[in-house]
Amino acid sequence: MFPWLRVAGIVVALGVSFSTPVAAQQRNPLQKVGSTVLDEPAQGYRFERFVIDSPDHARRWRVNLGVPTKAASVPAPVLYMLDGNAAAMVFDQGMLSELAAGKAPVLVFIGYDNDLRIDSPSRTLDYTAWVDTADDENGVAQSSGGGAAAFYQVIAQRIKPEVQRRTRIDTTQQSLWGHSLGGLFVLSTLYTHPTAFQHYISASPSLWWSQGAPQGAMEQQFLDTYRGTPAQLTLMLGGDERSGNRGVRDLTNPRVVAHLRRIAGATPDAAYQLSGRLAKVPGLQVSYREFAGLGHGPMLPASLTATLTALYGIADRSATPATTPTTNTDD
């Protein structure tokens, strides 16, 4: 359990300071990864890469695997990270050195086999358990998503076995982290496969997806039926997200207007409210952490660095602005 102040069964941490841009910027969907720690010699870790093909060879997932180089007397904990290309951009050599000198987890970056920081079409399909139909900027109804069940099988049947073949992991210390739609995938995986991981970390989950469907039948069934092996869930949210402060939006941009209509499917504090409901589930330990002054985009690096601190004890860098662009205000 994360060591934060407990309030009514929920963990709340405030006071992380970030500056907020006066004018919010939209994420560049073509932003490239560039050079990361995966491309550099690193003390304490070696990196391997493997690619998983879909059965029809139409889709490819690139997995970068960070393996501690020091000899371990016991199997290592493992952290699976969605949006693996973007996650790799959060790490630096200092973080790797601290991780290697401490609990030395195996690091699994699950991304797509291209050089994009975020592959929006691919993640939209993979990370969502519900099909979303909404009007685009031209007023034309578009449907997307609904591939989470198939993507879970890729992780369970293809990625996890390959990770275990390549390195020695502790199957009782498996964690899954995701942000935004990735945070939504973390939740749907908890609801449908609560024993697949021991710790689920959902940052800024897109609970508005498909007119708020993630807050519907799947959640309720989990609330009604979960009596499984104890698991931990950490929910994280930016303070600006919870307050509804989305920065300055260009309301003359049809894409922005269409997106704002879509995210109205959930209240800004939906993740906070969800933490309260899930905290009542027997056997599920629920933590909630809020980052004062942060919007949606900056929550990706902040939540990942906070996760590394809480799980593996490295210095807390969650209040340090990232050096890569994180001003994305898309949800």
Image (cartoon, grey):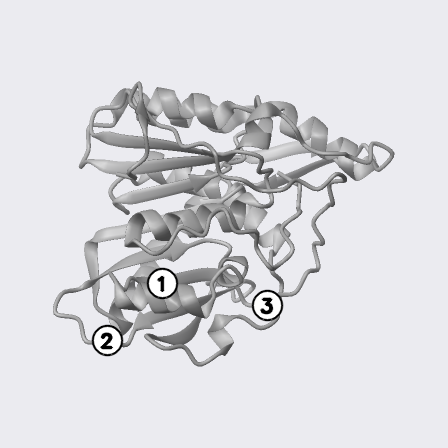
In the picture as drawn, the residue positioned furthest to the right comes out as 252
Amino acid of disc 2: Lys
Circle 2 packing at 10 Å, graded few (<14), some (14-19), many (20+), is few
Res 72 quadrant in image? bottom left
**Mark earlier in primary sequence (1, 3):** 1
Label 3 environment density (alpha carbons within 10 Å; few <14, some 14–19, many ≥20): some
Q: Which circle marks residue 89 in the picture?
A: none
Sequence-wise, the earlier of marks 2 and 3 is 2
The reply to whether callout 2 and callout 1 are in contact (CB within 8 Å) is no
| Residue beneath disc 1 | 107
Judge depth for marks 2 and 1 and give the one in front: 2
Identify the amino acid type marked 3: Asn
Give the Cα separation between the discs numbered 2 and 3.
31 Å
Residue 209 visible in the snapshot: no
Q: Position of residue 214 (x, y in %)?
A: 48, 29
- Helix, strand, or loop for circle 2? loop
Quadrant of the snapshot with the C terminus: top right
Q: Which percent across, then down, holds residue 311?
A: 30, 50
In terms of secondary structure, where does tag 3 sit? loop
Q: How far is disc 2 from disc 1 in space, using C-alphas?
A: 14 Å
**Residue occupying image coordinates x 78% and y 31%:** 257
- Of the two numbered discs 1 and 3 in the rendering, the one whose residue sits closer to the viewer: 1
Front one among 7 and 67: 7
- Disc 1 is placed on an element classified as strand
Cα distance in 3D space between marks 1 and 3: 19 Å
Residue situated furthest left in the rendering: 73
Task: State the residue at coordinates (28%, 73%).
Answer: 166
Residue at the spot of label 3: 114
Residue hosting label 2:
70
Q: Residue at x 54, y 40 (%)?
A: 17
